[in-house]
């Protein structure tokens, strides 16, 4: 049983999982003892971990609000969705435009089990869930939920938030993102956050070692490597920044230090 008493079926309860560690650190309820112990060990190595993870989630909120409000996007493909945590992406988009459509993708069975929380669409809009591994983009693009939910004649925002640090070089994260952008029309967007050790190399390196020790090896990226994801696209202002510097909306307390944030964020438009 998880720590909140929630039943397990095909869920691996013995080993920590990234979605559940993130849920534990963000104050959620859907984690097991292994996840809590992992999260505690990581936060000992880097006490800023909760600040960093919260800032990432806040970046997702602002990026989606920007895409819905300012860019007028009404369709989203969200890769590595995570355990539902309100507000979820569709709730933000549908608050701006109730007709918004969102396809969620994750490969962790706990996210599938809890996906009901992601399917609470407005009646005007639509949400769908695909259980798939992003390292196999063809499966995502072939899925009926993808084809039936999204109109590929209209812009789609591909959101890849806090996941590519789990994609190793042999799996070619840049190539995967390009493959997922390919069928989306000109005028579509890419929003990403990308893990980095540029601002606190020792501490973030130790956290990465804690993940690796639990069978979740990490690929952290430099700024130049983060830029590669957006080659040929038109970056929205202010370009690639640490997530807390990307269009701050004043809801942060202004005390976040750069060394507490290990994530670059950016939004860009497909122009050709
Ligand atoms: C740190 S959480 C991020 C959740 C959410 N995107 C956010 O930023 O708030 C990373 C998520 O990516 C998922 N994930 C990791 N590797 C994946 C893969 N290869 N394919 C699909 N999902 C993956 C995990 O299951 C987890 O839910």
Image (cartoon, rainbow, N blue to C red):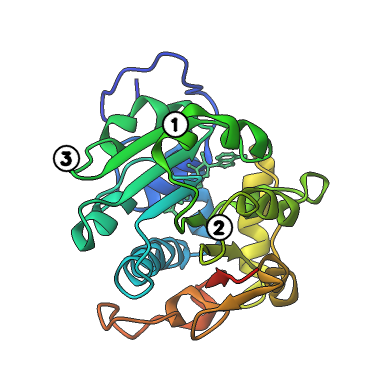
Q: Position of residue 184 (x, y in %)?
A: 56, 53
Whole-angstrom CA distance, mark 1 to mark 3, is 17 Å
Label disc, if present, on residue 18 of the rendered structure: none
SS class of the residue under badge 3?
A: loop
Label disc, if present, on residue 145 of the rendered structure: 1
Q: Nearer the viewer, residue 268 or 51?
A: 268
Image point (46%, 59%), residue name: 155
Q: Quadrant of the N terminus?
A: top left
Q: Position of residue 249 (x, y in %)?
A: 29, 81
SS class of the residue under badge 1?
A: helix
Q: Which residue is mark 3?
A: 123
Image point (28%, 30%), residue name: 116
Earlier-in-chain disc, 1 versus 2: 1
Earlier-in-chain disc, 1 versus 3: 3
The answer to whether any part of residue 228 appears in the image is yes
235 on left or right of 30? right
Q: Nearer the viewer, residue 268 or 166?
A: 268
């Amino acid at each position: 049983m998880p720590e909140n008493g929630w039943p397990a079926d095909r869920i691996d309860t013995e080993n920590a999982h990234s979605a559940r560690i993130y849920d534990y650190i963000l104050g959620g309820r859907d984690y097991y003892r292994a996840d809590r112990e992992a999260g505690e060990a990581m936060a000992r190595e880097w006490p800023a971990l909760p600040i960093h993870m919260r800032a990432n989630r806040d970046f997702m909120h602002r990026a989606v609000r920007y895409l819905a409000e300012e860019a007028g996007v009404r369709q989203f493909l969200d890769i590595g969705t995570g355990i539902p945590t309100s507000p979820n992406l569709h709730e933000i988009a549908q608050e701006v435009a109730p007709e918004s459509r969102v396809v969620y993708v994750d490969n962790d069975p706990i996210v599938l089990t809890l996906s009901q929380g992601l399917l609470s669409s407005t009646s005007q809009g639509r949400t769908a869930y695909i259980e798939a591994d992003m390292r196999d983009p063809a499966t995502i693009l072939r899925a009926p939920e993808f084809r039936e939910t999204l109109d590929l004649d209209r812009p789609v925002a591909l959101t890849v938030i806090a996941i590519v640090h789990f994609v190793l070089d042999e799996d070619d994260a840049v190539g995967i993102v390009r493959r997922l952008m390919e069928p989306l029309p000109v005028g579509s967007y890419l929003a990403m956050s990308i893990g980095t050790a540029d601002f606190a190399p020792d501490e973030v390196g130790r956290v990465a070692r804690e993940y690796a020790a639990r069978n979740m090896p990490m690929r952290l990226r430099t700024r130049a490597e983060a830029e590669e994801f957006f080659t040929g696209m038109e970056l929205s202002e202010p370009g690639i920044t640490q997530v807390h510097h990307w269009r701050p909306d004043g809801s942060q307390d202004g005390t976040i230090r750069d060394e507490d944030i290990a994530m670059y964020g950016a939004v860009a438009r497909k122009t050709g």
